[in-house]
Image (cartoon, rainbow, N blue to C red):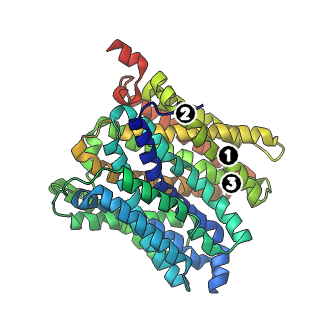
Amino acid sequence: MSQPPTSSGERSLMLLSLSISAAFLMEALDSTIIVSAIPAIAANFGVQALRVNLAISLYLVTLAAMIPASGWLADRFGAKRVFLWAMAGFMVTSIVAALSQSLEMLVGMRVLQAVAGAFMTPVGRLLLIRAAPKEQLAAAIAWMSMPTLIGPVLGPLVGGYIVTYADWRWIFAVKMPFGIAGIIYAARLLPADDAGVAHRFDVIGFSFCALFLGATQLVLDQLVHVSLPLPAIVALVVIMPMAGGSFLVHARRSAKPALDLSLLKLRLFNIGFFAGGLSRIGFNALPFLLQLQLQIGFGWSAAHAGSVVFIVAAGALVLKPLMRRVLARFGFRTTLVGNALIGAAATAALGFATPQTPLAVIVMLVFVFGLNRSLQFNTTNTLLFADIPKERQSASTSLGGVGQQLSMGLGISIAAVLVAQLQNLGVTAPASAMSCAIFIIAGLTALSGLYFLKLDPADGAAVSHHRAVLQRS
């Protein structure tokens, strides 16, 4: 069972983490819940379902493009103020999206939602990092991260039930109670903002970043489902290196670039960013592939498959009371290496599943995978910010947010491309193609574990409370 907080300070930090997590839950739900409603929205507006994909694509593009501005806004106007206004803006645009009378109005509201979401989650993470003492950072991030683990698998399930038994417009209203509770508690628990830091906003760097990130997200989207003409796709592929290269040149000359890439010189941040990104690709790809395998490969109904995939989220709930003990026992290095390898084994085992595999075995494997996924994400997020100086925390949440957003998109895109290419190579049976793709994803997950070997056993001991290291010091 979970250990109750031992002091009023720990209880306050837990409540603060949960209030901030409301923003993460709203954003995570919003990214996936609309997928189940695409046919209903298309029928309501009298348009092709393919056109409704704009409401998803432009949301993800805007979200990725606007994240670099979040750190500057937090420094300039105060993190608490920006966070609360972003949450309120997200909720207002959600309500207006539910009242949309045309696809154009819905897409416009989704873009505004993404702007609010791009400021909401990185700034929320920044507020928690500032509020949590180092020795409580792992527990605080575990509380805050639960929605980001639950939301992506909960969204399609909830969306499916809403569309089946109610009106699709309710998909935008279902998250309102979480947002209202989050704003009330965050306003009460967050300390007042310090005086804003007045430094010039890097408009040029932000423009290059927005072009690069927006083009990258669109290209990733095309890998999953081609919705743009070939000339537009070629233009995006050309824009990506041009915008990215231009930003790198600009960042070297700017004292305060839109994204501070010099953070990658910090060893723990570097390992958390790259190895963590690789592990997110693997751990995010498997739920997508498993949903396809169960529906297309095994012939299950969407509701049956969604219910089994949702068991992944149970790992986030079970893991919470265990994370501090695991880190204290094994430290960052052993935890991240070992857990990635166990997660890779669980992924590969699901690749061997067939329609004849007992349901209890599949459920057990999915649950174990959910535990691995939750532990890896929470531990990586903690490692990422374990040794960031206070004056660079806002910049670190912006860069970390961009990395997480791209790795999530890459996970789904790589999974979809693998299935398509395996079928092109002659693996004609859908179940076989998806099993092969699952094996490849398992290999990527294992590779991320080897990357974490760059850590020293003593790294992050002040945060993990690694007993073996503390006893020697």
Q: Tell me the residue at 47%/33% (across/down).
A: 5
| Picture quadrant where residue 333 is located | top left
In this view, which residue lies farthest toward the top? 472
Residue type of the residue flagged with mark 3? Gln
Q: Please provide percent x and percent y for residue 447.
A: 50, 37
The mark lying in front, picked from 2 and 1, is 2
Q: Secondary structure at mark 1?
A: helix
Residue 392's place in the image compared with 332, above or below, is below
Residue denoted by label 3: 291
Residue with the most extreme right position: 356
Nearer to the camera, 286 or 422: 286
Viewer-nearest of labels 2 and 3?
2
- The residue identified by callout 2 is 321
Q: Residues within 10 Å of mark 3 (few under 14, many from 20)?
A: many
Q: Secondary structure at mark 2?
A: helix
Q: Earlier in the sequence, mark 2 or mark 3?
A: 3
* Cβ atoms at labels 2 and 1 below 8 Å apart: no
In the image, taking residue 146 as reference, residue 384 lies left or right, namely left
Q: Residue at x 49, y 75 (%)?
A: 230
Distance, label 1 to label 3, CA atoms, is 12 Å
Residue 357 horizontal side relative to residue 149, left or right? right
As drawn, the label of residue 311 is: 1
Q: Earlier in the sequence, mark 2 or mark 1?
A: 1
Q: CA distance from mark 2 to mark 3?
A: 28 Å
Query: Mark 1 or 3 closer to N-term?
Result: 3
| Residue 348 seen | no
Crowd tier of the residue under label 2, counting other residues whose Cα lies within 10 Å: few below 14, some 14–19, many 20 or above: some
Which sits in the foreground, 411 or 458?
A: 458
